[in-house]
Amino acid sequence: ELKVEQNPLFLSMQEGKNYTIYCNYSTTSDRLYWYRQDPGKSLESLFVLLSNGAVKQEGRLMASLDTKARLSTLHITAAVHDLSATYFCAVGRDFGNEKLTFGTGTRLTIIP
Amino acid sequence: NAGVMQNPRHLVRRRGQEARLRCSPMKGHSHVYWYRQLPEEGLKFMVYLQKENIIDESGMPKERFSAEFPKEGPSILRIQQVVRGDSAAYFCASSHLAGGPNEQFFGPGTRLTVL
């Protein structure tokens, strides 16, 4: 059974600081997704990572994938308040069935 | 191009009633996934459907829950005889193709409250 773990679960950080969220998964996969969710809202797609060594950046967020280590990271640079949200990683496994297994989520709070 | 649509956005039911949740995928998408999110938790896969077919229902509770995606019309997630533990946010997502990494686009969710 595929398991996806994120850490930390909760993260409070000051504006302007850098931090990294980690996503580990238990079985082989070559596709990993990062989503953002604001309270009471749906999921917004941030990144799709499809190969070992993939790195994508959008604004202050950068995501990477190491399929050999079964690890993805979401790095936040110089955090600003509007990045406060819950961030989920999700792993897809099977061709022909793209169901996603989600991590537990990281609730990020940026403190002014 | 309208995104994934779900209705109702909020649904209140008393124990024992039925809940029907609807999902219209993005235009051109023929694959629908349903997920459930309990408070303070991540999303859990429930069922994957293509038009007129259930492909994977491994995440569906064995009783009271059913799903369909007819040839015409939205996908329906039906919960019979609801209990308080069914209170959750139910999200559907759609994608274009099977096979390969196809991004899923999520709807706004239906928040079910069982009194």
Image (cartoon, rainbow, N blue to C red):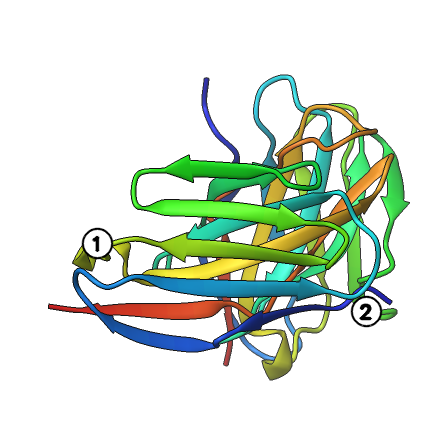
Q: In the rendered view, tell whether residue B19 sits above or below residue B8.
A: below
Residue matched to label 2: B61
In the rendered view, does B73 fall on the left or right side of B106? right
At which x and y percent is residue B14?
Answer: 55, 76
Residue visible at 79% across and 49% down? A29
Q: Please say if B92 is above or below B80.
A: above
Label 2 is placed on what type of residue?
Answer: Pro
Q: Amino acid at mark 1?
A: Asp
Q: From the viewer's side, name the closer residue of A93 and B65.
A: A93
Q: Are marks 1 and 2 in contact (CB under 8 Å)?
A: no
Residue B33 image-quadrant placement: top right
Disc 1 element: helix
Relative image position of residue A104 (x, y in whole percent): 57, 71
Position in image of residue B63 (x %, y %): 85, 70
Q: Residues within 10 Å of mark 1 (few under 14, many from 20)?
A: few
Q: Is residue A22 visible?
A: yes
Q: Is residue B108 left or right of residue B72?
A: left
Q: Nearer the viewer, mark 1 or mark 2?
A: 1
Q: Is residue A7 above or below residue B22?
A: below
Chain of the residue under label 1: A
Numbered badge on residue A82: 1
Where does residue B104 sit, x and y in percent of width and height?
Answer: 62, 37
A68 or B56, which lies in front?
A68
Q: Is residue A58 left or right of residue B19?
A: left
Placement of A63 over or under A20, stated as above or below: above
Chain of residue at mark 2: B
Can you see residue B9? no
Q: Which image quadrant is residue B24 in?
A: top right
Instruction: For mark 2, give the secondary structure.
Output: loop
